[in-house]
Amino acid sequence: MHNLIKVAVADDHPVLLAGINVLFANSGRHEVVGQAITADGCLELVRTSAPDVIVMDLSMPGDVFRTISQISTTAPKTKIVVFTAFCSLESAIKALDAGATGFVLKGSASSELLLAVDMVFADQMFITQQYASQVMNGLRDRARRQVVDESNKLNIREKQIIGHLLQARTNREIAGELRISEKTVKHYMTGLMQKLKARNRVEVVIAARRSQEAELERGQL
């Protein structure tokens, strides 16, 4: 039994809950260790049963998205698969942002839910087939927007310094070009690292290039 994947199931529809339990119990690869019918019940279930994977509906009573976030933070070893009838792109991205690594639509083949559990247990992401490309495109588009937004927070002097960084100039060369001291350049570099969430000069350059690419893709240049 120790080789089986421990699965918990949370859904407030009794018939569906029972059916999912039977599906996993009969798979030969999974062991059902508990069930819940509310978002708060999921937290207690994870605390007491420590499942490898919890399969959760989005329409249960309570704040399910907050619960997903709490589980992913306090019990990171428990992977989360959302199994829901909600088929909006927004709900899928919100669930993944909160910490879920699997998203399966109700109405999918039972084999897809089983595969999702197996994949997230193996530290891989699974998104229901009919939604995968839309969700991944949505995540990529948002990442591009975030990079551009971070770049737009820069002041004129910071953008000037980035322009020189992209030309591989040293702090001394930048100081000479802008007629400021090297100390001032270092001060601006510290601010750039904070704004662009970069740890060093190289990461500042990488973030700046990503911003340029994102703006080009959006037709802003």
Image (tube, rainbow, N blue to C red):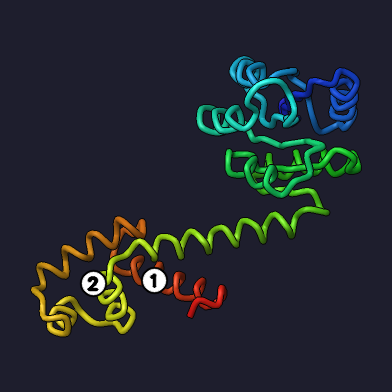
Sequence-first tag of 1 and 2: 2
Compare residues 216 and 207 and report the one nearer the observer.
216
Percent across and percent down for residue 185 are 16, 70
Badge 2 element? helix
> Does residue 110 appear to the left or right of 55 in the view shown?
right
Percent across and percent down for residue 90 are 67, 47
What amino acid is found at the position of numbered circle 2 in the picture?
A: Arg
What's the residue at 60%, 62% (across, down)? 141
Instruction: Tell me the residue that label 2 is attached to.
Output: 157
Compare residues 121 and 97 and report the one nearer the observer.
97
User: Is residue 77 placed above or below 134 in the rendered structure?
Assistant: above
What's the residue at 64%, 35% (across, down)? 79
Percent across and percent down for residue 133 are 74, 60
What amino acid is found at the position of numbered circle 1 in the picture?
A: Ala
Q: In which quarter of the image is residue 58?
A: top right
* Mark seen at residue 79: none
User: Is residue 49 placed above or below 128 in the rendered structure?
Assistant: above
Q: How crowded is mark 2: few (under 14 residues within 10 Å), some or many (20 or more)?
A: few
> Does residue 157 appear to the left or right of 47 in the view shown?
left
Instruction: Tell me the residue that label 1 is attached to.
Output: 208
Percent across and percent down for residue 65 are 62, 32
Q: In which quarter of the image is residue 123?
A: top right
> Does residue 112 appear to the left or right of 73 in the view shown?
right
Report if the CB atoms under discs 1 and 2 are less than 8 Å apart: no
Asked if residue 12 shows in the view, the reply is yes
Q: In which quarter of the image is the N terminus?
A: top right
What's the residue at 14%, 78% (across, down)? 175
Badge 1 element? helix
Q: Quadrant of residue 71?
A: top right
